[in-house]
Amino acid sequence: MAFNFLVVDDSRIVRKSIRKTLAMTDIPLGELLEAENGKDALEVLRNAWVDLVFLDINMPVMNGMEFMEALRADAELKDTPVIVVSTEGSAERIEILESMDIKAYLRKPITPEDLAQSVTSIIGEFGREQLQSTN
Amino acid sequence: MSNYKAQIETVATRILEDWGMMMVEPSENSKNIFASDDQYIVTSVTFKGAMNGSYSILCQQPFVECLVDNLLGGGDNVEEEDKEDALREMANVLCGNLLTECYGDDTVFELGHPQLRAVKDGEVDIFFSDRALCFLADDEPVSISFSLESMNGNH
């Protein structure tokens, strides 16, 4: 089963490096989608199935916090898993994000190993849930 | 500024080594470490919060190319936009991490979007003052200037 990912970051280089890292893991890859801001990301999610979102916080047009509020308020999209990847480090903001049910918070700069480990453990969780639902 | 030099050095070294995969060494605070015939590039990010201020990085093209090569693993078709983007992202990450290092996880800051510009020779003097810190990353010169605003002027 292949997994679809969405990388939401206004930095092209971050999007490229996350895509590169994902391609180096053993995770079966479906589509690797990208968006430059939260607004574009919501549009992508309304038109494509995404298994996991990588989300930056500090973005123009619609930032990561605004995106999370919109995502969790959307009946169709509210259960979409999200990993936050951000320079943002304040305990207060992280607490708010965790209350919005993010899967993980990775503080930039992230290493490919950190990213791969985080994704692998979350994907593993998906696999176990699927197994449970079929038993 | 002198109060923050140690933190600037710690954070810049850690991030350029771990993220940029570059070897970082201290250097003299002098324009001489830069190539006189190469254009300077400045990337600046402002921040607001418990303190307001700005974080700026001075470098030249060879540093940028080295950074992008390391970030993208080489071999990719690197576009000009990638180079500019790499500098902006570097400024974003360095500034964000420095603010956490200086003020801790409990302090909230809003970072502006990093701005990039070419500068002329005469405009770079601040990067060689006691308000800046120079070093070499993979033998390429870089200078960082960090300033805070207060009621009475800059720190």
Image: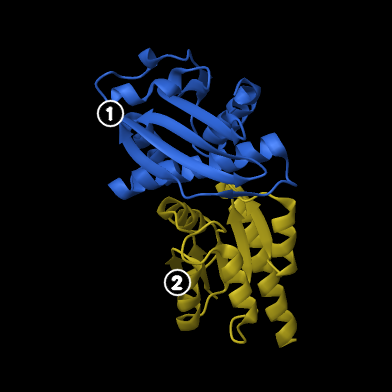
Residue B123 coordinates in the image, percent (x, y): 34, 26
| Image spot of residue A74 (x, y percent) | 60, 83
The percent position of residue B143, horizontal first and vertical second, equals 46, 25
Question: SS class of the residue under badge 1?
Answer: loop
SS under mark 2: helix
Residue with the mark numbered 1: B39
Q: Is residue B133 left or right of residue A130?
A: left
Q: Nearer the viewer, residue A127 or A114?
A: A114
**Identity of the residue drawn at 70% across and 70% down:** A100
Q: Nearer the viewer, residue A26 or B64?
A: B64
Residue A75: give its label: none
* Amino acid residing under circle 1: Gln
Residue to which mark 2 is pinned: A40
Residue occupying image coordinates x 50% and y 49%: B112
- Amino acid carrying label 2: it is Asp
Residue B96 versus residue A70 in the image, above or below: above
Residue A71's place in the image compared with B50, above or below, is below
Task: Find out whether the residues at labels 1 and 2 contact each other: C-beta distance under 8 Å.
Answer: no
* Residue B98: quadrant of the picture: top right
Q: Colour of chain B?
A: blue
x, y percent for residue A127: 67, 73
* Chain letter, yellow: A
